[in-house]
Structures are given as structure tokens and as C-alpha cells.
Amino acid sequence: MDCCSQKGNVLSRFFKRKQDNSFSHQNCNTRKKLVLVGTPNVGKSVIFNRLTGAYVTVSNYPGTTVEIFRGTGRIGGEIFEIIDTPGMYSLMPITEEERVTRTLLFNENFDIVVHVVDAKNIERMLSMTMQLKEAGLPVMLVVNMMDEAERLGRKIDLDRLSALLDIPVVGTSAALNRGMDQMRRKVAEYVKKRVA
């Protein structure tokens, strides 16, 4: 399912947004696509809301009762379709939610897959980062809740982590809107680099 499958609903939201803040419609086929993945409770939904604002579409994935959140946001001068997926622990699904996320990842073409992890528990979450990378997906790592990790005295060398994983890494505290501008910049740079 893509953004055009609910054209009436999506277009009405675009027109509403255009009236509100001059947000112009961009053809669904030329729009970049960003998907957020990660385990439950890592702040994906907060990041989704920061990137999209209030206008989103919620629908069940076909044939399931699993909800998928879709919205749009402007990143680096371009309009992105942004999808928030149900929580998953690995690409080897056990639950229906994980199966839906895995199916979504491999059935839609994304310009960037943003893996969101909790900075306090980063060690046990990086195995999924490696799975996403090994699957050939265009992955960027967002280490969220940096403020909470810092309060616990944890320091994470994001540059070193990026070099070790060979993917872009950014630290955020999305609930505080900290690091979100840097995340948008890194998303725009990564997508442009892939196109070039």
C-alpha cells in the first residue's frame, strides 16, 4: 500500500495543510520515503510526530489489524512520506506486528530506513541494525533518549559508532526536540548521496 492508494484522504489532508501553512502537494510517485523502525518504547512515535506534525493517516495493513501511521514532512527542501511501523526486535518475525513491519520493509521502496534505538540500551539493539544493513536496506541509526543516557553517566561516541557500522548515526532526545535538526540534515545528506 502506498500513499496514492488513499488518494482522496491524503489529498484532502494536503489541501488542508496548504491552507494552514502553504505546504504544497508533491506527486506521490516523486516523493521520497522514510520509514521508522525499532523496538517498542524507543521514541519512534515522538520522532514521527516531530517530522510530520499533526496531519497523519492511520490505516490497518492489508489483511491485518496492525495499524500503520503515515504522514508527510519537509526535509532538506523536499517532501517525504514518513511511515511509523509497529515495534520489532529483529527481521525474523514472531508477532503479527513484526511480520507486518518486515513485509512493509521488503515490499515498498524506501529512500531511507531510520532505525531508532534507546541510548540506554544500545548494545542489545545494534543486532537489528546489522540485520537491516545486511539485508541491503539504506539504514541510518538514530540513538534516541541521549538525555536519559547522559543522566545515567553514559557517553556514546557517535562518530566512532558511525565509522564502525559504516552508516550515518545521529543522537537525539526527541521528547526535548534535541538533535532533530541534525537528524533532518543527515537524512537529507544521506538520501542525496544515494541518488548521486
Image: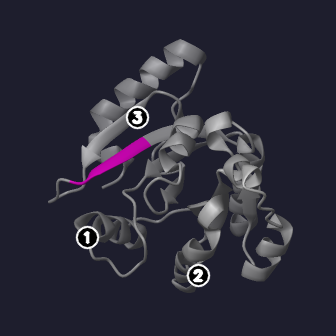
Give the class, few, some or many, for how many residues have Cα within 10 Å of label 2's Cα (few <14, many ≥20). Answer: some
Q: Nearer the viewer, residue 3 or 51?
A: 51
As for residue 69 lying within the magenta part, the answer is: yes
Name the secondary structure under disc 2.
Answer: helix
Task: Give the quarter of the image for residue 12.
Answer: top left
- Residue to which mark 1 is pinned: 95
Q: Residue at x 76, y 65 (%)?
A: 193
Give the residue drawn at x 73%, y 40%.
178
Q: Amino acid at mark 2?
A: Met
Q: CA distance from mark 1 to mark 2?
A: 20 Å
What residue is shown at x 56% (from left), y 86% (from top)? 134
The residue to which callout 3 is attached is 56
Q: Which mark is residue 130?
A: 2
In magenta, the rendered stretch is: 66-70
**Quadrant in which the N terminus appears:** bottom left
**Mark toward the viewer: 1 or 3:** 1
Magenta stretch containing residue 88, yes or no? no
State the quadrant of the C terminus: bottom right
Say whether disc 3 or disc 2 marks the residue closer to the N-terminus.
3
Q: Which comes before the other along the chain, label 1 or label 2?
A: 1
Q: CA distance from mark 3 to mark 2?
A: 30 Å
Q: Is residue 111 left or right of residue 169?
A: left
Q: Is residue 99 left or right of residue 23?
A: left
Check disc 1 and give the amino acid type: Thr
Q: Position of residue 144 (x, y in %)?
A: 64, 53
Please indicate whether residue 93 sits to the left or right of residue 131 in the image: left
Q: Are marks 1 and 3 in contact (CB under 8 Å)?
A: no
Q: Position of residue 146 (x, y in %)?
A: 71, 52
User: Gap between marks 1 and 3, in whole Å?
Assistant: 25 Å
Asked which secondary structure carries label 3, the reply is strand
Colouring scheme applied when the structure was drawn: one colour
